[in-house]
Image (cartoon, helix red, strand yellow):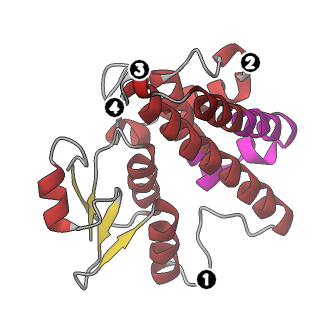
């Protein structure tokens, strides 16, 4: 299998770290949907990251779907990144849902404010999206603060995705989601980014300390 996409995308980075965590062998090819658009288009005409080239040569898109496919194929009895306990698994689902909403809306906001010319930016849209990702991060922070099962066990989908998207916003738009208001997310991210696993798949940006494991 080959994973296509840049690690400065939280969706690509999430997928790479999860595949590594699962012990699933894959090759990573860093192709940008911006600076190397035509190269990406030659691989996948939809030009969506991440793209997974499966062993049969077929393509899969969307980080959640890629991971669902790999886990179903490699771990038919159940993925080690999801709890076997029904209540704990439901809490993981809720955390992943919040992290996914935060990721989607944060990326929309970053594109609007950092790629679109200022004169063309739509303030009502920015206000709406800001409200959505700040609410998602607040809900995620509350889950981490009140449900210790999400932070006390081995790394899983909930902690992985939460740490990845928190790194992105603190690297790109820290003023929008202050770390001081999200201490549990901040501690989770710092702890995760210090591990050899996360350091093997660093994003482009200042969110990860310099050096390598």
Nearer to us in this view, 15 or 126: 126
**Residue at position x 73%, y 56% from top?**
92
**Residue 77 got which mark?**
1
Mark 4 or mark 1: which comes first in sequence? 1
In space, the residues marked 4 and 1 are separated at their CA atoms by: 33 Å
In space, the residues marked 1 and 3 are separated at their CA atoms by: 51 Å
* Secondary structure at numbered mark 3: helix
Determine which residue is flagged by label 4.
213
Determine which residue is flagged by label 3.
118
* Secondary structure at numbered mark 2: helix
In space, the residues marked 1 and 2 are separated at their CA atoms by: 39 Å
Quadrant for residue 35, please give it.
top left
Q: Main secondary structure of the magenta part?
A: helix
* Secondary structure at numbered mark 1: loop
In space, the residues marked 2 and 3 are separated at their CA atoms by: 28 Å
Note whether residue 42 is visible: yes
**Residue 181 got which mark?**
2
Q: Marks 4 and 3: in contact by CB < 8 Å?
A: no
Other residues around mark 4 within 10 Å, as few (<14) / some (14–19) / many (≥20): few
**Residue at position x 35%, y 38% from top?**
8
In space, the residues marked 2 and 4 are separated at their CA atoms by: 30 Å
Highlighted range, magenta: 135-161
Q: Marks 1 and 4: in contact by CB < 8 Å?
A: no
Q: Marks 3 and 2: in contact by CB < 8 Å?
A: no
Quadrant for residue 25, please give it.
bottom left
Left or right for 106, reference 26: right
């Amino acid at each position: 299998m080959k994973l296509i996409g840049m690690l400065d995308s939280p969706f690509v980075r999430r997928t790479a770290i999860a595949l590594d965590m699962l012990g699933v062998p894959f090759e990573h090819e860093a192709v940008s949907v911006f600076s190397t658009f035509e190269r990406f288009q030659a691989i996948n005409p939809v030009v969506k990251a991440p793209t997974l080239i499966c062993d049969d040569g077929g393509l899969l898109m969307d980080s959640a779907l890629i991971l669902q496919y790999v886990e179903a194929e490699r771990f038919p009895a159940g993925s080690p990144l999801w709890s076997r306990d029904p209540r704990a698994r439901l809490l993981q689902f809720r955390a992943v849902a919040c992290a996914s909403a935060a990721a989607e809306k944060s990326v929309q906001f970053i594109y609007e404010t950092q790629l679109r010319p200022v004169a063309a930016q739509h303030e009502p849209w920015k206000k709406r999206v800001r409200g959505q990702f700040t609410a998602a991060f607040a809900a995620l922070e509350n889950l981490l603060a009140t449900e210790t099962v999400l932070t006390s066990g081995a790394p899983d989908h909930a902690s992985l995705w939460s740490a990845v998207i928190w790194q992105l916003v603190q690297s790109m738009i820290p003023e929008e989601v202050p770390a001081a208001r999200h201490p549990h997310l901040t501690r989770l991210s710092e702890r995760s980014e210090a591990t050899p696993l996360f350091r093997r798949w660093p994003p482009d940006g200042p969110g990860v300390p310099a050096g390598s494991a």
